[in-house]
Amino acid sequence: MATRGVTGSGEPARAQAVVRGGGGVDVGESGAASGGGDARTPNDLAPQDSSSEIAKAYAPYGIIIAIFCVANSTRSRRRWRRNRSPTCSSAGLHVTNPKGKPLASLTFTFNWLAATGSLMIIAGILTRSSCGLGAPALTAYKDTYVELRWAIVTVMAVLGWRT
C-alpha cells in the first residue's frame, strides 16, 4: 500500500510501500524488511513457465503465419489458378460488356481453399494436433458451429440468392 503526504516543512513526503508477506513484512523507504517472516518479491511469487509451455503458447500464432504465407505465395496462387475453382453465373442476368462477353462481376467464384475462414479452420486443426488438444478442442468447434449456425445459413442464402 503506498501513501503520500506532506512533511512539516511543506515538502512532499517520499512514497512508502508496505508489502504484506506471509509473516507481515513491512518494507519502508530504505527497502529493508522489518517485522520478521519471509520477504518475497513479486517475481518470487510468479509461476515459472517451462520452455515447452511457452512453445505451446506461441504455436498457434506460428501456424497461422505459416499457413497464410504458404497460401499467399506466388507458387500457390499459380497452382490454384490452374486448378480452377468452381464458378457459376447469376441466373436470369445476361449482361455483357461492349465486346459481348459476360461481366466478371456477375460470376460467383467458389474459392473455398484460398478464403481466410478456410485457412483459419485449417490452422485450428493443425494447432489442435500440434499442441495435443483432444476432445475439448472438438467440443469447442462443435459449440462454435452450433452457435453460428444461423449466421452461416444467412451467408449461404445471400450467396445462393445471388446465383
Image: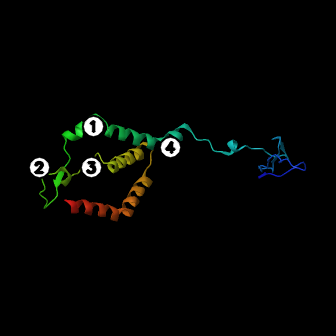
Q: Earlier in the sequence, mark 1 or mark 3?
A: 1
- C-alpha gap between disc 2 and disc 3: 31 Å
Left or right of 147 in this view: 13: right
- C-alpha gap between disc 1 and disc 2: 33 Å
Badge 4 amino acid: Ala
Residue nearer the viewer, 15 or 141: 15
Residue nearer the viewer, 160 or 98: 98
Crowd class of label 4 (few under 14; some 14 to 19; many from 20; radius 10 Å) = few
Q: Quadrant for the C terminus, please.
A: bottom left
- Above/below status of 49 relative to 91: above
Q: Residue at x 19, y 41 (%)?
A: 83
Q: Which residue is mark 1?
A: 76
Please provide percent x and percent y for residue 81. Answer: 21, 40
Q: Which mark is residue 94?
A: none
Q: Which mark is residue 98?
A: 2
Under circle 2, the secondary element is loop
